[in-house]
Image (cartoon, rainbow, N blue to C red):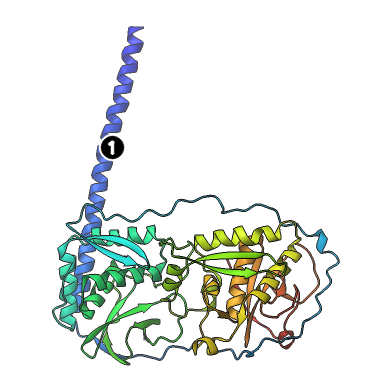
Amino acid sequence: MKTKIYLSVCLVLSVYFFKAQNNKEFEEYKKNEAKAFQDYKEKENKEFANFLKQRWAPFTSKKGQPAPINPKPLVIPTNVPKPIDQPNKDNLPLVKPELKGLEFKPAPQPFVASDKFESKKAIVFYGTPLSIGYNPFILQHVSSISEDGLGNYWDLMCSKNYSTFVNEIEAISVSLSLNDWGKYLLIKKISEQFHQNKNDQVCLQFFILNQLGFDSKVAKADDNFVLLLPTEELVYGISFIPINGKKYYVINSNGSSFYTFNKSFSSKNKSISFNSNKALTINDDIKQKVFTLKNGKTIIIDYNANAINYLNDFPQAELSVFFNYPVTEITEMSILRELKPQLIGLSEIDAVNFLLSFLHSSFEYKTDDLQFGREKWFYPEHLFFYPFSDCEDRSILFAYLVKSLLNLEVIGLNYENHVSTAVLFNGDLKGDKIVYKNKSYLACDPTFIGASVGMTMPQFINAAPKVIEIK
């Protein structure tokens, strides 16, 4: 018996020492890997700083593509079409009473700066107070508007422990659920708080964006530095410099002649995207819009005025961005609370017809040209803020409502002079159909007043629209 106990103890001790030895070796391995990565980063930064000091080449920017201006009627046609009779609509699934998303969610906690920093600076980012931790080294000034000036600036920034500050910005971005462009807006805001000089601001933005993994460049123009950013999606109305097959958009400059470089800091650095798969979580500044439905009931939709200001600082990107952008939680909750009960017990087609009627009757029509003097597409929440909307805007909100309230597939339809939608139902129904990827979608036009499911504006019945995928 004693022998068995002795052997068991020896076995346990052997396993313990074996694990301890393995843990020690693993920790040593991690330490060596971290050092190797740090050495690589230092080498990469040094090589890039030396490259920046070389003579830059002249470039001429090209005018940005203007947003497509679709000549729209000043007044929506007033004739009321006869709804399509759908004899088999009662065979479609009924809308169930689940109100997903209405569970209470605590407000996001304010971001607290790390204690690793010597100093803290308070900023307000679209109504959201932030405490930014930093060390004095981050307040470097660019010595001259030249290749040497930027190269020396990069050297100075890399000679300190910049990664803690960069990680702080990434942590704030995550806490606010910012997309790529939102991160740029945050970095811009921080740079403006740290520096009064515009060139120092641009240099700090350039450095942080690259260290965060975003491709960006700096150009010289009229004794000033200008930030250049490539984007994943097409951007309208902003001039760009083509470099190595990429469009680098010129941020905040009206010039056309520039000097810049063609190398990127890292081949792994990515372009800025405007898409987002998470709803923004900045502080709420709640405003409301009241609607009276055709059945006489009044509903109130909440929206976040801070989010409106944030979205207004986005450039005009391609339509797919607007169709796929999430709304803030406050708006999502009020839409579910106010509109979902109106749909319970209806068939899919009656529910979609209700939403079409809501878009037809609750939003006042005016073209972008008359409202803004230019083409301006709305994110879904914009329709609750601005007094008027047109076909793109209504289609974007309608698509969101169908997805969030009914969980049906929707596609956007981009005609030459019109934007509409089509919905995939769980049954074979009558009406104008758009076949896309072997699926048959029924036309649903939130701008064609009085039109029901399956009806297309007469002038577009024989037109072939470009399909916009909605995830």
> In the depicted view, which residue is nearer to us: 276 or 72?
72
Q: What residue do we see at 42% from left, 68% from top?
A: 306
Q: Is residue 267 left or right of residue 291?
A: left
Q: What residue do we see at 27% from left, 56% from top?
A: 113
* Residue annotated with mark 1: 23
Q: Quadrant of residue 128?
A: bottom left
Q: What residue do we see at 49% from left, 90% from top?
A: 373
Q: Measured from the top left, where is residue 104 in percent x and y?
A: 51, 50
> In the depicted view, which residue is nearer to us: 241 or 333?
333
Q: Measured from the top left, where is residue 335 in percent x and y?
A: 59, 62
Q: Measured from the top left, where is residue 416 in percent x and y?
A: 62, 87
> In the depicted view, which residue is nearer to us: 187 or 230?
187
Q: Quadrant of residue 298?
A: bottom right
Q: Quadrant of residue 253?
A: bottom left
Q: Measured from the top left, where is residue 193 in percent x and y?
A: 24, 70
Say if 206 sits above or below 136 in the image: below
Residue furthest top as drawn: 1
Asked if residue 80 shows in the view, the reply is yes
Determine the secondary structure under disc 1: helix
> Number of labelled discs?
1
> In the depicted view, which residue is nearer to us: 447 or 371?
371
- Type of amino acid under label 1: Asn
Q: Is residue 29 left or right of residue 304?
A: left
Residue furthest left as drawn: 143
Disc 1 crowd rating (10 Å Cα; few below 14, some 14-19, many 20+) is few
Q: What residue do we see at 19% from left, 69% from top?
A: 46
